[in-house]
Amino acid sequence: MSAELLFWTAHLPLMLLLLAGLGYIVRLWSKGKATSGPRPARDLLSLLRAFVTEAWFNRRLWRNDRWRWAAHFMLLTGFLLLMTLSGIAALSEKVLYHLLHLGHIPWISMWYTADHPVTALLNEIGGVLMTVGFLLFVVRRYVLRPAQLRTGPMDHWMVVGLGLILLTGWITEVVRLNSSHIGPAPHIAFIGYPLSRLVANLPVAWDRWFDALYLVHGLLTSAIIATIPFSKFMHAIAGGLTTVLNEVVPPAFIPARPPASPGDSFPYTRRQMIELDGCTRCGECVIWCPTFAEKPDRDGITPLVKTEKVRSFVRREHSLRPRPPDSTALQIHSEDTYDCTLCGRCGIVCPVHIDTRHLWIAMREDLVQRGVYPEALNHLRETVTTHHNISGDPNAERLIWSQNLDRIPDGVGKKDRAEVVYFVGCVSSFYPQTYSVPQSMVEILDQAGMDFVVLGPEEWCCGFPLIIAGMGKAAVESVRHNVDAVRRTGAKWLVATCPSCYHTWKHDYPRILGEPLGFEVLHATELLAEILREGRLHLQPFEQTVTYHDPCDLGRTSGVYEAPREVIRAIPGVTLVEMEHHHEYSLCCGGGGDVEMADKGLTEAVARRRIQEAQATGAKVLLSACQQCKRTLMGAARREKVRVRVMDVVELVARQLGD
């Protein structure tokens, strides 16, 4: 039996194994829920552009780490080129030549002709790119060994598998170029040909060795390809899919799955199932995680470990012999998952664009369904569903913040219809440190001549704390109540000073209800920017240097970066300086993700880093556009004895109002 016949005899079953494995993975993916909400049109051109710029060229890696970018780009380009050439050669020879008898056509015959100038050059380029990329990968992972890497058995297998393919491939080419299996332009192989000349005079039966090596290299390559669904190699497929899909529909605006219905035990969407397999374990997320920076001994906090654990849990539970996760491992995973502020930095730097924030919320939903979550969240759920706010105070006192106003505008408790509804939020309504935010906001709206109203006791918690806790089902009643309350006012706009309320209203409410709200949702800074552009407010000079902290739920989660800065720059005399990390790379204040309820010390530690960054700018005023950020950063400044005044942007605008 010839070497070629032996190869095909073994190759075809291995490819059937590959297809069976891919079928198993696709079946797992299909268990996820379809995401809901309106979808942008996805034309072929936008998908192709996303593949080229993000999956293939990978602009994120280019910006963040040129070494890793080079390894990724060359390894992927070489692999794609070689696999494409192999596929075209097989199609041309086995189908177009033997079956359709079209081998006489030059542009067909060149693909299976050994050492044809075109194919020889492309093959050599592919081999060189893949080899150099592989060597860069090995040096980084095993020699340089940056702290964020987590090298496990799957990484070793990937290195061994690729290394064997490349080594046997180069040896086979050298042997072939010294055998009778040589074509018209062997010198085109600018690496293989010179190497073959170096060993040409050795007393070796080149033809016999070529047959053996052809078989070994081919079967080894086929065997390793067959392991793709069961190894880290799967990320090459899943990562590419994730990158393209999340680039076409940006991660911050992908509608999260609605709260699970009764009896629904699977919390992940189809896209999230693909993302679990798309993680490359590159570790880029590790160095950007604010909570891991404070708990470096807890590796399970890192995004890559959480992803790996959940992938393992899912595969165990949906294998041929389903097994539940180990209870101890599940408890540890729960502690790690809830020690996360949901700041979303990991998603911003992820090379394959994994939408981490929604993935972490889905993990929390899963843990709630399993009954493995912090006890404090039961109190949160009881408080919100009973008192309709997070503080547990009587909801009838939602306007207590207005009592210190010099003049209470008509929109505060004196009318029930208006063009604008100001949704105050729980923090501003019940925490004295932030009373000045709604006081400032209604003063601005009143002076700008806006027709507005606040809901008072009819305003219930927006549901955000429950949604991010994984208890979204408990928030549905609040969602329906709030939307009905706003609709009764006849408002065209809803404005929120709280970024979490803003995001929940704008992105989660339409998804949960399954219908448009019927009015536009704005953050306070977006409305203020519009008012200032129209010249409806006159501001007094403020001769100070200030810095601005991007709230996670306003910036990374909702994409609002410039409106707050536009408002700040509109104040005469202000000098705005940026902190080391700003815009999408901004550090979290530590106050998000319900972490404060489970681990107050962790919140304080994260806030300490951010207040130190603010101090380093030399600014006298630290501005934000979030009441929770204000509370957290004020506390950090006080504990660290940092002489910086923490204010909301709305407060500064109200302070500078002229006549």
Image (cartoon, rainbow, N blue to C red):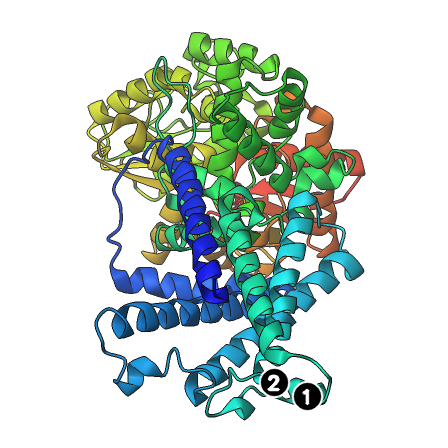
Q: Disc 2 on helix, strand or loop?
A: loop
Nearest the viewer among 546 and 523 is 523
Is residue 353 visible in this depiction of the protein?
Answer: no
Of residues 601 and 363, the one drawn nearer to the viewer in this rendering: 363
Please state if 644 lies on the left or on the right of 175 as rendered.
right
Q: CA distance from mark 2 to mark 1?
A: 6 Å
Q: Nearer the viewer, residue 511 or 418?
A: 511
- Residue that mark 2 sits on: 178
Q: Residue at x 48, y 70 (%)?
A: 82
Badge 1: residue crowd in 10 Å (few <14, some 14–19, many ≥20): some
Q: State whether residue 264 is above or below residue 14.
A: above
Residue 86 drawn at (x, y percent): 43, 69
Q: Looking at this view, is 176 or 504 the one in front?
A: 176
Question: SS for tag 1?
Answer: loop
Instruction: Specify the label residue 17 is tagged with.
Output: none
Q: Earlier in the sequence, mark 2 or mark 1?
A: 2
Q: Position of residue 554 (x, y in %)?
A: 47, 43
In the image, residue 6 lies at what x, y percent? 48, 59
Q: Which mark is residue 200?
A: 1
Q: Are marks 2 and 1 in contact (CB under 8 Å)?
A: yes
Q: Is residue 549 left or right of residue 405?
A: right
Looking at the image, which residue is at 42% across and 19% down? 265
Q: Amino acid at mark 2?
A: Asn
Q: Is residue 659 left or right of residue 621?
A: left
Q: Amino acid at mark 1?
A: Ala
Instruction: Work out whether residue 131 can be spotted.
Output: yes
x then y, percent, for residue 341: 59, 34
Position of residue 235 relative to residue 425, above or below, is below
